[in-house]
Image: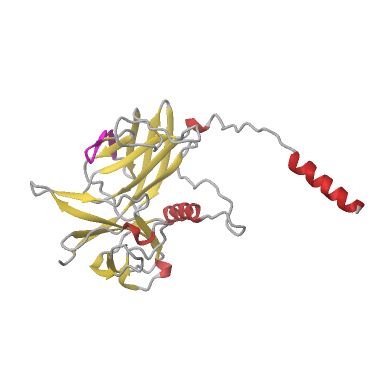
Amino acid sequence: MKRLYIILLGFICLVSCKKEYNFKIDSSVQDRLVIEANLNNLNTPQMIRLTQMEKMLKPVDHSSSGNKKHGIPVDKAKVVLTDGKGKSYTFKRYVEFEGATFNGYYRFEKQIPAHSGDKFTLTVSVKGKVYKAESIVESCPDIIKIKYTLAKSEIPGKEDQYVPLISFTNPDKPAYYLLREVEVNTNSDGTEFISWSNRAWTFSILSSKMLNKNVVDLRVDDGQSPSGSSFYLGGPGSTIRVYMFALNKETYKFYESLIRQFDNDGGAFQPFPSSAPTNFSNNAIGWFNISDGRYADVKIGK
């Protein structure tokens, strides 16, 4: 009985102890620059985004329209891409994107001539600080064929989805890919415009180690992605475009680390949450990559 009293007394003391703790955030957090720079060599404008980390525990809108809850935009920066021969490409501040006003975006209007084996350096200068990162271009195989299949929904009330299938030939060495799907539309003047999924994650990544030499009718979501098949677009009569980009191993590992963060459920066998890697100098956050890319279209029958 005496032992029971001692245990109860210890438990009461334990649960009755309370200490207030003022959570403090490192003052250097707000000074850290976040750089989103996923570029390619296709004939489309290239975009880079710069923001600063928030030193608070809730989202804040720092823009006039659009661009909500995505960090503090950095609008007075010098952004220059340089190839291995010393040729430079300057990204200009770009404030209007898809009809909305955005801040922190920088754009290069022309195609960047990047080929397999080329080395590029991205330099970002903000308030006297210089941030640099390098990327080497990997070769992307040609797309042999694109078609689609109708995936029947097993969830009541959810529509069936038209899933793009891609065929290509793997190289003899290890390779890493990023696959993305968009919908191609036409303006009244005949020009094209692209519709993206409104999901936060709209692509999948995969390694050639998981594929056969000849890849035939691969679903574009068969790689790693926290979104699964939910980013599919298009219906009868629409045109779907599949982009395929070659990644270097370091970039593939970067995306892998992000997916692990999304998938972490806090279980005992999950790795402890940590910051994603970065290839930028001077304590910046983010990743710079430039890819060799291919794309092909398929029209869904009515």
In this rendering, position of residue 213 left or right of residue 241: right
Main SS, magenta residues:
strand
Above/below status of 191 relative to 207: above
In this rendering, position of residue 147 left or right of residue 285: left
Above/below status of 66 relative to 76: below
The N terminus: image quadrant: bottom right
Name the foreground residue: 7 vs 139. 7
Q: Residues in magenta? A: 88-100
Name the foreground residue: 195 vs 1. 1
In this rendering, position of residue 76 left or right of residue 298: right
Name the foreground residue: 2 vs 56. 2
Give the mark count: 0
- Residue 74 location in percent, x, y? 37, 31
Name the foreground residue: 143 vs 82. 143
- Residue 30 location in percent, x, y? 48, 31
- Residue 67 location in percent, x, y? 33, 37
Q: Quadrant of residue 243?
A: bottom left
> What residue occupies the far top of the structure in this picture?
127
**Which residue shows up at 89% across the image and 52% down it?**
3
The C terminus: image quadrant: bottom left
Q: Quadrant of residue 96?
A: top left
Decide whether residue 90 is among the magenta residues: yes
